[in-house]
Image (cartoon, rainbow, N blue to C red):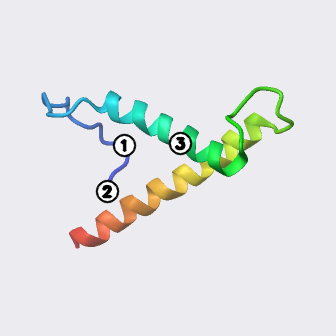
């Protein structure tokens, strides 16, 4: 797969993704509350940039995994 080829303009589609993302945020906040007994707050003693950076690295790894798995199915 050539990663530099731009994707075509999207079609009209069916479902509005925003509502799902908002619900995902709410669900994730509740998951965090159950795990840590608090919601994410400022000045919590953690380095938010480092946390976000490490999560971004994980995201890229998962994305590349999915691309590789899709390519393997296409063979």
In this figure, what is the number of numbered marks?
A: 3
Q: Which residue is mark 3?
A: 28
Residue ID at (49%, 35%): 25
Q: Earlier in the sequence, mark 3 or mark 2?
A: 2
Residue at numbered disc 1: 4
Q: Is 72 above or below relative to 43?
A: below
Residue 28 drawn above or below residue 11: below
Residue 32 in view of the camera? yes
Q: Residue 1 shows which numbered tag? A: 2
Q: Is residue 73 above or below residue 20?
A: below
1 vs 54, nearest the viewer: 54
Displayed quadrant of residue 39: top right
Left or right of residue 24, residue 75 in this image: left
Q: Secondary structure at mark 3?
A: helix
Q: Nearer the viewer, mark 3 or mark 2?
A: 3
Residue 10 x, y percent position in the rendering: 19, 31
């Amino acid at each position: 797969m050539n990663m530099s080829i731009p994707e075509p303009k999207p079609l009209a589609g069916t479902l509005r993704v925003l509502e799902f993302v908002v619900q995902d945020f709410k669900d994730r906040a509740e998951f965090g509350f159950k795990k840590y007994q608090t919601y994410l707050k400022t000045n919590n003693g953690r380095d938010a940039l480092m946390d976000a950076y490490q999560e971004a690295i994980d995201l890229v790894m998962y994305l590349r995994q999915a691309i590789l798995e899709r390519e393997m199915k296409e063979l």
